[in-house]
Image: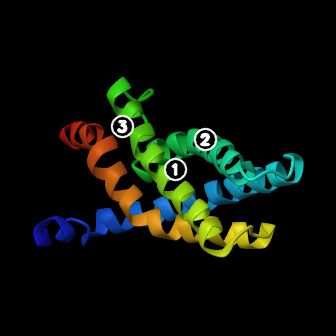
Amino acid sequence: MKRYLQTFMNRESLGQFIRLAVVGGFNTIVDFGIFNVLLLVLPNQRWEASVAVSISYIAATALSYVLNRRWTFQLDEGWGSTRETGAFYLVNTLALLATLAIVEGSQVLWGPLTVLQLNIAKFSAVIVILFPKYAGYRDLVFRRSLEKDRRS
């Protein structure tokens, strides 16, 4: 485990993590914008937060794939393989499930939440999943493309 964690302690990984955070910040703005619009539009039902989280997350994830592939990991050639795209959506599906668990768990613990409280719960999830998503992108999603690019 120590050896694995050390792979994150180099200039390339630091640069990727910083770019990932910038892309993540932009995608978070998109995600939260859609999330809040949906909270205003959806009828006031128990499941509205889950629906809003899911729709906004899916939209931001599509944008995230393009930006992370092109800028964070600097893979310019064409589109990713089916394996790469599938792995990206798998990592993000797991992150979505963690986000839903945090938002829904917050509502179970504290009862119905205000829009501000829902945003705080959702932002907490963003913080919790940031490093695991980066590790997933680096090691599962873009690894083969990065290795191929280094050999060229």
Q: Is residue 130 left or right of residue 119?
A: left
Quadrant for residue 59, please give it. Answer: top right
Which amino acid does the dot numbered 2 rest on? Answer: Ile
Q: 71 or 55: nearer the eye?
A: 55
How is colour applied across the structure in the image? rainbow
CA separation in Å, label 2 and label 3 = 15 Å
CA separation in Å, label 1 and label 2 = 9 Å
Q: Residue at x 74, y 67 (%)?
A: 112
- Name the residue tied to disc 3: 87
Earlier sequence position, callout 1 versus callout 2: 2
Q: Residue at x 28, y 44 (%)?
A: 140
Residues under numbered marks 2 and 3 in contact, where contact means CB atoms less than 8 Å apart: no
Q: 44 or 58: nearer the eye?
A: 44
Which amino acid does the dot numbered 3 rest on? Answer: Ala
Q: Position of residue 31 (x, y in %)?
A: 68, 53
Q: Which numbered tag is attached to residue 96? A: 1
Quadrant the N terminus occupies: bottom left
Q: Residue at x 56, y 44 (%)?
A: 61
Q: 16 or 103: nearer the eye?
A: 103
Residues under numbered marks 1 and 2 in contact, where contact means CB atoms less than 8 Å apart: yes
**Callout 1: few (<14), some (14-19), or many (20+) C-alpha neighbours within 10 Å?**
many
- Name the residue tied to disc 2: 58
Earlier sequence position, callout 2 versus callout 3: 2
Q: Which numbered tag is attached to residue 149? A: none
SS for dot 1: helix
Q: Position of residue 38 (x, y in %)?
A: 81, 48
Quadrant the C terminus occupies: top left
**Callout 3: few (<14), some (14-19), or many (20+) C-alpha neighbours within 10 Å?**
some
Earlier sequence position, callout 3 versus callout 1: 3
CA separation in Å, label 3 and label 1 = 14 Å
Q: Can the viewer see residue 142?
A: no
